[in-house]
Image (cartoon, grey):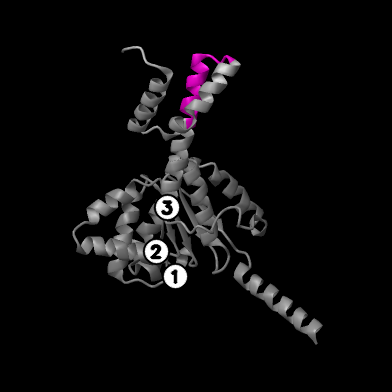
């Protein structure tokens, strides 16, 4: 390579970094180079700092991309969830789940409880934390998932969709049993659960105890097989707590009554 001036080196470096798609290094190399000269940092340390910047940039972009892809509700985060409402045993299990080890063991997570107890919020918050740990997560309401599976079957692309869904570390199915489905609809859901068995974690929320799942899968044999696959390796969280929506409504009503009393 011919001798280059400092200006030519900078121009060539900018061009190469852009071609190699290294936006992290491209954004910081000049500042890092100036610091390295001032502080007499070794070449190895300088290189390490550059690649760390690139890694962080890629991690941030990947996390944002996976969050969008996950379809998780933006507002349902761990920061906005009141963990003080959880029973001690459930909160302990949540701390363990937040470590993410259950995904490597292909364990499922089943959340049961009446409406308004925070099941959806909790499972979505867990999903977001897993994405920040570098795991791929996809969220569906049960009814939306069933309809997508049925459309794929009708259009002869069900195997392709199943293959895509199997790539996720965690599949969240919200409100299973909340909307009554036909037997044909629940058959496609059962095939998905069977395909993910011991191959990937499923996180399920439901208002119905297992004893009522015959209403979901219609057939006793299919019901037993679905439950067997879900509970073989699983963590069960029972949210037997008052409805937070009802509590919030009561607080608003009390505040309105107090305001009306002061006005009178």
Residue 261 vertical placement versus 44 (above, below) = below
Q: Residue furthest bottom?
A: 264
Q: Earlier in the sequence, mark 1 or mark 3?
A: 3
The crowding category of the residue bearing disc 1, from other C-alpha atoms within 10 Å (few below 14, some 14 to 19, many at least 20), is some
Q: Is residue 169 left or right of residue 126?
A: left
Q: Earlier in the sequence, mark 2 or mark 3?
A: 3
Q: Is residue 76 left or right of residue 225?
A: right
Give the label on residue 178, or none.
1
The crowding category of the residue bearing disc 3, from other C-alpha atoms within 10 Å (few below 14, some 14 to 19, many at least 20), is few
Q: Nearer the viewer, mark 1 or mark 3?
A: 3
Rendering quarter of residue 175? bottom left
Q: Could you say whether the residue bearing mark 3 is in a helix, strand or loop?
A: helix
Considering depth in this image, is 171 or 219 the residue closer to the camera? 171
**At x 64% / y 55%, what residue is drawn?**
83
**At x 56% / y 68%, what residue is drawn?**
116
What distance separates the C-alpha of mark 2 from that of mark 1? 8 Å
Magenta region includes residue 41 = yes
- Whether the residues at callouts 2 and 1 have beta carbons within 8 Å, the answer is yes
Q: Is residue 171 in view?
A: no
What distance separates the C-alpha of mark 2 from that of mark 3? 19 Å
Q: Which residue position is annotated with label 3?
A: 68
Q: Which residue position is annotated with label 2?
A: 142
Chain part drawn in magenta: 40-53
**At x 41% / y 47%, what residue is drawn?**
65
What distance separates the C-alpha of mark 1 from that of mark 3? 25 Å
Residue 34 x/y as whole percent: 54, 22
Q: Could you say whether the residue bearing mark 1 is in a helix, strand or loop?
A: loop
Rendering quarter of residue 238? bottom right
Magenta region includes residue 4 = no
The crowding category of the residue bearing disc 2, from other C-alpha atoms within 10 Å (few below 14, some 14 to 19, many at least 20), is many
Q: Is residue 16 left or right of residue 263?
A: left
């Amino acid at each position: 390579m011919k001798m280059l001036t400092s200006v030519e080196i900078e121009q060539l470096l900018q061009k190469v970094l852009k071609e190699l798609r290294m936006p992290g290094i491209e954004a910081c190399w000049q500042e890092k180079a100036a610091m390295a000269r001032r502080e007499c940092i070794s070449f190895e340390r300088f290189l390490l700092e550059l690649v760390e910047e690139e890694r962080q940039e890629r991690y941030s972009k990947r996390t944002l991309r996976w969050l969008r892809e996950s379809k998780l509700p933006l507002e349902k985060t761990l920061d906005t969830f009141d963990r003080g409402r959880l029973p001690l045993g459930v909160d302990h299990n949540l701390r363990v789940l937040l470590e993410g080890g259950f995904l490597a063991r292909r364990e499922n997570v089943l959340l049961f409880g009446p409406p308004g107890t925070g099941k959806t919020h909790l499972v979505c918050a867990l999903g977001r934390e897993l994405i920040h740990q570098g795991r791929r997560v996809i969220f569906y309401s049960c009814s939306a998932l069933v309809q997508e599976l049925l459309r794929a079957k009708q259009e002869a692309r069900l195997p392709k969709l199943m293959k895509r869904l199997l790539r996720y570390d965690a599949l969240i199915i919200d409100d299973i049993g909340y909307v009554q489905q036909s037997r044909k609809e629940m058959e496609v859901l059962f095939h998905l659960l069977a395909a993910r068995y011991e191959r990937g974690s499923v996180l399920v929320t439901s208002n119905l105890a297992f004893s009522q799942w015959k209403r979901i899968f219609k057939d006793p044999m299919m019901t037993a097989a679905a439950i067997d696959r879900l509970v073989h390796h699983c963590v069960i969280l029972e949210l037997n707590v008052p409805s937070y929506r009802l509590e919030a409504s009561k607080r608003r009503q009390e505040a309105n009554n107090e305001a009306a009393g002061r006005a009178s």
